[in-house]
Amino acid sequence: MTEVSTNALFPETFQGTAADIAGQIGLMWELIKAPLIVPLLRAAVYICLAMELMLFIERLYMGIVIVLVKLFMKKPDKRYKWEPMRDDLEIGNEGFPMVLVQIPMFNEKEVYKISIGAACNLSWPSDRLVIQVLDDSTDPLIKDLVEKECLRWANKGINIRYQIRENRGGYKAGALKEGLKRDYVKDCEYVVIFDADFRPEPDFLRRAIPFLVHNSEIALVQGRWRFVNANECLLTRMQEMSLDYHFTVEQEVGSSTHAFFGFNGTGGVWRIAAINEAGGWKDRTTVEDMDLAVRASLKGWKFLYLGDLQVKSELPSTFKAFRFQQHRWSCGPANLFRKMVMEIVRNKRVNIWKKFYVIYSFFFVRKIIAHMVTFFFFCVVLPLSLLVPEVEIPTWGAIYIPCIITTLNSVGTPRSIHLLFYWILFENVMAFQRTKATFIGLLEAKRANEWVVTEKLGDALKNKEKTKQTKKPRGSLFGDRILPQELGFAVFLFFCGCYDVLYGKSQYFLYIFLQVITFTIAGFGYIGTIVPS
């Protein structure tokens, strides 16, 4: 009976030993391909095409809306009440509301002077402004430098406070929350947050605060980020393209149509009463800024984005820093979506259309689908389809729609249009890390609450030549530079590309080999600025 069953399940070529191992593997592949691989891969293609269409419709909707906004919608100062803040000789500075400036820091040796100096130079009456440096640094030398810088400005008559905590509980959210508890903050109506690398123009408050003063329903005025080091390297150029689309389109559309968008964590002014009504800062995810924005929106507050209110900042220029940042930015929203989706559904203070926008467009498509379809379709399903000719991917799904989506994504940075193809390859590489982080957030797995402060270089690169001879510790090479997962994908894609050259007819190997090169460059860490230790 056993002999009959074995002969029925396996051909005679599998009986005994075989000299041609490759032939045996090929035969086994043929046995499982038709009943198992083809149906699974075909289902994966349909799922990816469905996700791609969702992303395409969302991008097309955003594109149409932004065109209509630019052509027909009034400027923010015409849509809302806005009057400039004026000095009054009779009442003095009493006409200016009390404003708190919070600057959270953590071992910011390279940029602490820049951010503190920019905040202290804000054009606002000194007796109506409190600058709060929230220093969570663990390096005693850096803490001493920051404190001395605060004392230097205090001696010039600036109302600046240096605050430290006993521990880093809650990270940035914990520092901001602790800062609002100080006695001298009780008279402040508004709080503006600047991360340690942000450099606001002196008139920032005079342009933003009037929207809050004259429109009681507005909780947040968000400014746009501009990047002082966008031309530093190819990595910063790629980031500029992605972030410019976010600010030029996503934030503008959210502000104009729904009065809701995700707070960017810095470069924005909050009404303190709105923060308190929403429940204050929470550290349950790594996107405390988005968490607060969603909760405030569910309370009925409106947000305003000002595209011409620009704040200079720094992009992470090392690949290691960028990967940590992208993990936090991808994992956090997915984890917040898991925690808040039912709260949004049950909320009775916002209309159904706004709920749909927040759940579907803001969270599901932009924070989850966009990462997954980029990775699974172009780095897994499309290459695998080259090994299984029975599964066909329609040209519109593999070429036409992705090209339209990419073109729509490029509208924010027309100066980098010539880098568009490399940007696609780079985004596909980063989609792997973002997809992994998204699953970690959705499943609330290990690293879901990992918080690594993004490294800033400030003016450190100006001294790069002086430190050129400094040697890196030997132990840092593998962990910091060589990335086995990216190199593994390079090998997989190379195999698929070679198979397509030998047996395929699709010509996709041209794209596959370019993607192999990009994964390899990333795998060996040759992206971005390499700073000597």
Image (cartoon, rainbow, N blue to C red):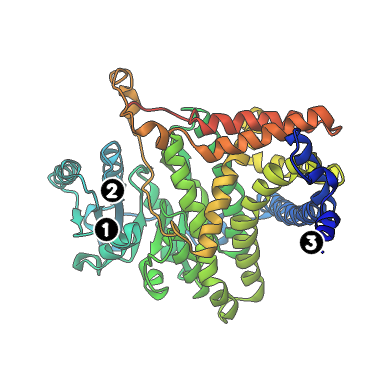
Residue 223 in view (yes/no): no
Mark 1: few/some/many CA within 10 Å (<14, 14-19, 20+):
some
**Earlier-in-chain disc, 1 versus 3:** 3
Residue ID at (12%, 45%): 155
Residue 399: x %, y % from top left: 79, 40
Asked if the residue under mark 1 is in contact with the one under mark 2, i.e. CB atoms within 8 Å, the reply is yes
Residue 202 in view (yes/no): yes
- Quick check: 357 above or below 89? below
Q: Nearer the viewer, mark 2 or mark 1?
A: 1
Residue ID at (60%, 66%): 358
Q: Which residue is mark 1?
A: 168
Q: Secondary structure at mark 3?
A: helix
Q: Which residue is mark 2?
A: 106
Q: Secondary structure at mark 1?
A: loop
User: What label sits on residue 122 in the rendered view?
Assistant: none
Q: CA distance from mark 1 to mark 3?
A: 66 Å
Asked if the residue under mark 2 is in contact with the one under mark 3, i.e. CB atoms within 8 Å, the reply is no
Give the amino acid type for the residue marked by disc 3 in the picture.
Answer: Thr
Residue 46: x %, y % from top left: 79, 55
Residue 19: x %, y % from top left: 75, 33
Asked if the residue under mark 3 is in contact with the one under mark 1, i.e. CB atoms within 8 Å, the reply is no
**Which residue is more in the foreground, 117 or 92?**
117
- Quick check: 440 above or below 319? below
Residue ID at (26%, 64%): 178
Q: Secondary structure at mark 2?
A: loop
Q: Which residue is mark 3?
A: 2
Q: Which quadrant is the C terminus positioned in?
A: top left
**Earlier-in-chain disc, 3 versus 2:** 3
Give the amino acid type for the residue marked by disc 1 in the picture.
Answer: Arg
**Which residue is more in the foreground, 372 or 458?**
372
Give the amino acid type for the residue marked by disc 2 in the picture.
Answer: Phe
